[in-house]
Each structure stands twice: as structure tokens, then as C-alpha cells.
Amino acid sequence: MLTLHHLNDSRSQRILWLLEELGTPYELKSYQRNAKTRLAPPELTDVHPLGKSPVITDGDVKIAESGAIVDYIIRSYGKGAMMPAIGSAEYEPYNEWLHYSEGSAMLPLMLNLYVSRLKEAALPLQPRIDSEIANHLGYVDGALKGREFFVGTALSGADIQMSFVGDMAKVYDKLGPYPDLAAWLSRMQARPAFQRSIAKGGTYRFAE
């Protein structure tokens, strides 16, 4: 059976959401961060050498990268839903969003997370980080203008994968200048499957 190794307050929340959207049978194995260090528990290294989450196992298949997990689950269990047909005009934009989320958009947001812990020592870096965050969130907001979803007219893996970008922007109170991104995030989080994923995976926060 498909198993999701789920760490609280982590990117694995969006994988749980995806599974709930698809109605795919799965087993959920939950892990808790250390309350003081916020690090993942050592038990996750028994699942994957990186000790990170999300990780899925499905028979002999083991995948630890969010974009690859989203792609695998949709291709294997989506029954044609939640992705454009390969070769269609919408497929390449869809594939680009899957990679863009972690490859580009998350970098300045994660830098903001870590650098903010340096307090005054971070001040020289903060303007550049803020500029990059604005650059990426502006791009995402523009892509959503007049659109309900990132690609096509229905929820896809692109929306699932990009949700963590929206979550992090919301945590750091960066959504104000980006109404289309903010509205999209609200729509996604109002979906029944998203609400079920929170009920099963636990309320999450990323501020610490």
C-alpha cells in the first residue's frame, strides 16, 4: 500500500492534501519534530537517508522529493485527473510549476526563515531577500490573475505543489500586495479535501 511518512509542520502536508483530493487509499505514518530544535526525529532516517519529509513508499518505490512525489501519485493513482495530457499545450506550464515551486520560489522564503533567526546580524542581507521574495510573489500573483487555478480550469498537481509557497508567504505576512495569490490560497484551503488533510495531519505552522 502507498504510505506517506508525514512530519508535522512540513511540506508533507500538501502530499496529504493530494491524497485526500484523489481519494487514494493510503497509510499515514506520522512523525513529530523535536519541540526545542524543530528538527525531524531520527526515525525518519530509517525511511530515507536524508531524514526528511515528505517521503512515500509504494512497494519497491521510495521517493523523497515533493515534486516527484506529486508527479508519481498523480500518474499512478490519478486516473487521468489533476494533470494535463502529455503533449497538450497545458502540460509544459504544468510541469514548470511542479519544478518552480522548490527550484526557485522557495529559496528566498527559506532564506528569510533562517536569516531572521540571526536578528541584527541579518540586516545586511534582508533587503536582497525581500527583493527576491517580491520578485517571485509578483510573478506568481501575475500568473494567477483572472485564473482560478494555475493550469487549466480544474485543480491540478501544480496547485498542490505551489501551495507551500503560498503558505510560507502568508506566515511571513507577505501576501498583502498580491491579492490574486491570496485569493487563490484561500480557495485552496477552503476545499473539503484540504480540510480533511488538516484534520488527519494536524494543524500546522511554519513560523518557528
Image: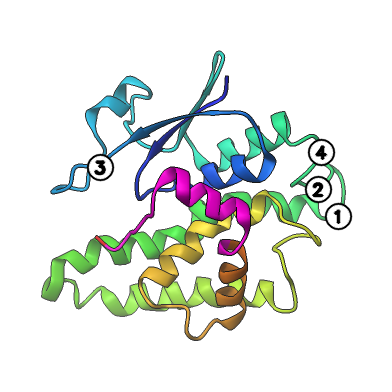
Against 34, residue 4 (above or below) is: above
Q: Compute the Cα span from label 1 to label 4.
A: 16 Å
Q: Could you tell me if residue 76 is visible in this image? A: yes
Q: Which residue is mark 3?
A: 33
Indicate yes or no whether the magenta region holds residue 51.
no
Against 161, residue 55 (above or below) is: above
What's the residue type where badge 3 is placed?
Answer: Arg
Sort mark 3 into few (<14), some (14-19) or many (20+) by Cα contacts within 10 Å: some
Q: Compute the Cα span from label 4 to label 3.
A: 35 Å
Q: Secondary structure at mark 2?
A: loop
Q: Which residue is mark 1?
A: 89
Sort mark 2 into few (<14), some (14-19) or many (20+) by Cα contacts within 10 Å: many
Of the two numbered discs 2 and 3 on the same chain, state the one appearing first in sequence: 3
What's the residue type where badge 1 is placed?
Answer: Ala
Looking at the image, which residue is at 43% across and 70% down?
169
What's the residue type where badge 2 is placed?
Answer: Pro
Q: Looking at the rendering, in which quadrant would you find the C terminus?
A: bottom left
Q: Which residue is mark 4?
A: 80
Q: Compute the Cα span from label 4 to label 2.
A: 8 Å
What's the residue type where badge 4 is placed?
Answer: Gly
Q: Secondary structure at mark 4?
A: loop
